[in-house]
Image (tube, rainbow, N blue to C red):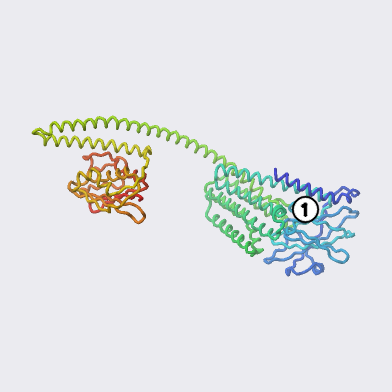
């Protein structure tokens, strides 16, 4: 609607200008306005050096609409002969299209000399009284019913030229109609862009994004092809108009090709179409690069048009070979692509025969683009509805998962509460039993059965310690699950912390400790001691009696601490590496030893909390557990 209002205002302004110019002459003239049909001739100046005097003496060939094409830049001259009706008093206007004709010079003979008027895309300031998308010249009255004009056409983008001679009244009406048409087309493009942008933000789908880009590039090309952008933004540098227009055309074709490629990719068509599209996209990228170096050639522009007329038929073949579309959809989309191709070819045929009929108005009317855009709009509308249903299904699944997660969190909290309660209820009796054993030991330790009582007391004390260790380990794993650890980082001497462990002090003859005493680490001392203590406890449990347990401490080049605990195992009693760090795993040879199967799980979790790692290897009947922690 904004584009419609702006363009109708501009056309109204142009109407006022022309009416103020033509009102004195038309008050006494007849009100019946006419379109005069001029007789046109074409002469091609391949040298680009001939002036109007030289050209006026040349023989002109009949001209329809299509310019003579050449692989090198050429200059064309049009001879325009207008048969003016008797009694014609209102001024005549020459209307030339399309707008992207780079430079126009209109000559008329006056007093034995040729007078020049300038126009074309390089002179936007001279087009203020002309409707958008065309160039206009006032035809001076030579006093003769047969008027002859020479038009010099210098362009690289255009391939056809349309000419009309209008009376001033008809010119005003035609300007208003054209302004309204341009406003409607821009309004449609803005609507499609706005719709696709909303769906792109909502669903973030590549197909919708490419559709949005195609419509933005269509609007960009449309504004350049009609001169709106030139007049408003680059009027001071009109030489840049032709390169920018060519870039806009290439971008339009690129985005449309990418959209087609994504569309048929979803329909799983044959690979040849992907190679076909990528070949053309590469060509356009090369063409854009050559534009920046001012090396663009006319044959490249002709290849663009070749693609434009042949692509619908290749697309129809690709859709027909799709593996996902149903037979009915294949028929619909193949037929639609073929119809677009046939209409474009028919439009070109009508332009060639100068029949005055244009079905799609290839450029700059962008009728074909509008037709394709509306078809894609209907496709993406259905696709977006499907995406919305999938989105609602995903939201439902997320809500279900959230409900399930909340339930699991409640269960986890209840489990933690149960573990805390059991730990409290079990530790109190164990502490009482430990105190009672101490009292019994002091009573019976002096009797004649002191040795026998001592062994029983030691066995009972070890059982209490094992039970206490199981409770502590379950509590530690639960604390990790609940993420209740708060790190207290401090400087810690590693060897000193290891040598102070009670397990090492009780069996010092079984341990061989290697490393430098000055090795220190910035970490949580309690968690470090828990890791090493659990590794040493495993080594003591699962190694044969009287075998050596080795502990080595060193630093790595990447500022990390390496601590290795190794011990022997009985033959064929090595653990399963795949299940070693899983919960409740216990080897089939370890059921006679106390444990929960949580020790290595605890070690691995604590290493991850400290941003470290733990690994395992088995060599020569010895197991090696390696802990790496950052210094």
**174 on left or right of 444:** right
Task: Say if 546 sits above or below 162 in the image.
Answer: above
Which one is in front, 83 or 202? 202
* x 27%, y 54%: residue: 516
Q: Position of residue 276 (x, y in %)?
A: 56, 57
Q: Position of residue 95 (x, y in %)?
A: 79, 55
Residue at 17 percent of width and 37 percent of height: 458
User: In terms of depth relative to the viewer, which is nearer, 120 or 541?
Assistant: 541
Question: In the image shown, does 14 or 461 lie closer to the viewer?
Answer: 461
Residue farthest left in this picture: 448
What percent of the width, then of the height, locates residue 421?
Answer: 32, 30
Q: Which residue is mark 1?
A: 128
Q: Between 290 and 359, which is closer to the camera in this rendering? A: 290
Residue at 33% from the left image edge and 39% from the top image edge: 477
For the question of whether residue 346 can be seen, the reply is: no
Q: Is residue 67 visible?
A: yes
Q: SS at mark 1?
A: loop
Q: Position of residue 107 (x, y in %)?
A: 81, 63
Left or right of 602: which side holds 141? Answer: right
In the rendered structure, the answer to whether residue 324 lies left or right of residue 218 reads: left
Left or right: 370 with respect to 391?
Answer: right
Residue lying at 64% horizontally and 58% vertically, measured from the top left: 304
Q: Is residue 281 above or below residue 191?
A: below
């Amino acid at each position: 609607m904004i584009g419609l209002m702006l363009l109708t205002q501009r056309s109204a302004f142009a109407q006022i200008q022309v009416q103020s110019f033509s009102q004195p002459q038309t008050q006494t003239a007849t009100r019946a306005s006419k379109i005069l049909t001029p007789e046109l001739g074409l002469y091609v100046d391949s040298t680009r050096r001939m002036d109007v005097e030289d050209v006026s003496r040349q023989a002109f060939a009949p001209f329809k609409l299509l310019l003579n094409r050449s692989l090198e830049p050429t200059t064309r001259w049009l001879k325009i002969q207008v048969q003016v009706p008797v009694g014609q008093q209102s001024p005549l206007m020459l209307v030339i299209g399309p707008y992207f004709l780079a430079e126009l010079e209109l000559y008329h003979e006056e007093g034995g000399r040729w007078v020049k008027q300038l126009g074309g895309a390089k002179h936007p300031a001279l087009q203020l009284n002309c409707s958008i998308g065309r160039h206009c010249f006032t035809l001076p009255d030579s006093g003769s019913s047969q008027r002859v004009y020479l038009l010099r056409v210098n362009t690289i983008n255009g391939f056809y030229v349309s000419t009309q001679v209008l009376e001033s009244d008809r010119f005003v009406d035609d300007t208003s109609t054209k302004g309204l048409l341009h406003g409607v087309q821009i309004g449609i493009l803005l609507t499609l862009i706005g719709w696709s942008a909303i769906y792109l933000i909502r669903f973030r789908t590549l197909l919708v994004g490419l559709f949005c880009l195609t419509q933005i590039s269509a609007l960009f090309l449309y504004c350049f092809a009609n001169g709106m952008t030139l007049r408003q933004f680059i009027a001071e540098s009109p030489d840049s108009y032709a390169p920018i227009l060519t870039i806009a055309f290439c971008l339009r074709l690129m985005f449309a090709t990418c959209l087609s490629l994504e569309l048929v990719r979803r329909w799983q068509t044959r690979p040849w179409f992907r190679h076909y599209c990528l070949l053309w996209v590469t060509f356009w990228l090369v063409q854009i690069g050559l534009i920046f170096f001012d090396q663009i050639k006319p044959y490249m522009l002709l290849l663009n048009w070749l693609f434009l007329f042949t692509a619908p038929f290749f697309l129809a073949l690709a859709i027909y070979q799709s593996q996902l579309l149903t037979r009915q959809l294949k028929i619909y989309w193949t037929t639609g692509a073929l119809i677009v191709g046939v209409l474009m070819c028919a439009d070109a045929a009508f332009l060639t025969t100068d029949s005055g009929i244009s079905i799609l108005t290839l450029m700059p009317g962008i009728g074909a683009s509008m037709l394709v855009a509306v078809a894609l709009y209907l496709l993406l509308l259905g696709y977006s509805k499907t995406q919305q249903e999938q989105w609602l299904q995903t939201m439902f699944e997320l809500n279900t998962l959230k409900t399930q997660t909340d339930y699991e969190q409640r269960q986890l909290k209840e489990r933690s509460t149960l573990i805390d309660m059991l730990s409290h209820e079990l530790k109190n009796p164990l502490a009482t039993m430990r105190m009672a054993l101490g009292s019994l030991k002091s009573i019976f330790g002096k009797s004649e059965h002191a040795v026998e009582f001592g062994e029983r007391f030691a066995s009972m004390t070890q059982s209490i310690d094992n039970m206490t260790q199981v409770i502590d380990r379950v509590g530690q794993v639960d604390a990790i699950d609940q993420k209740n650890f708060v790190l207290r980082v401090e400087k810690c001497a590693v060897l000193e912390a290891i040598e102070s462990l009670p397990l090492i002090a009780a069996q010092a003859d079984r341990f061989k400790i290697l490393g430098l005493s000055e090795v220190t680490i910035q970490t949580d001392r309690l968690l470090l001691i828990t890791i090493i203590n659990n590794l040493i406890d495993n080594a003591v449990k699962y190694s044969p009696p009287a075998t050596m347990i080795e502990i080595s401490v060193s630093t790595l080049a990447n500022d990390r601490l390496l601590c290795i605990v190794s011990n022997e195992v009985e033959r064929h009693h090595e653990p399963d590496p795949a299940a070693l760090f899983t919960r409740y795993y216990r080897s089939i040879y370890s059921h006679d030893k106390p444990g929960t199967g949580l020790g290595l799980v605890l070690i691995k979790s604590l290493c991850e909390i400290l941003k470290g790692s733990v690994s395992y290897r088995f060599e020569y009947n010895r197991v090696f557990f390696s802990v790496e922690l950052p210094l």
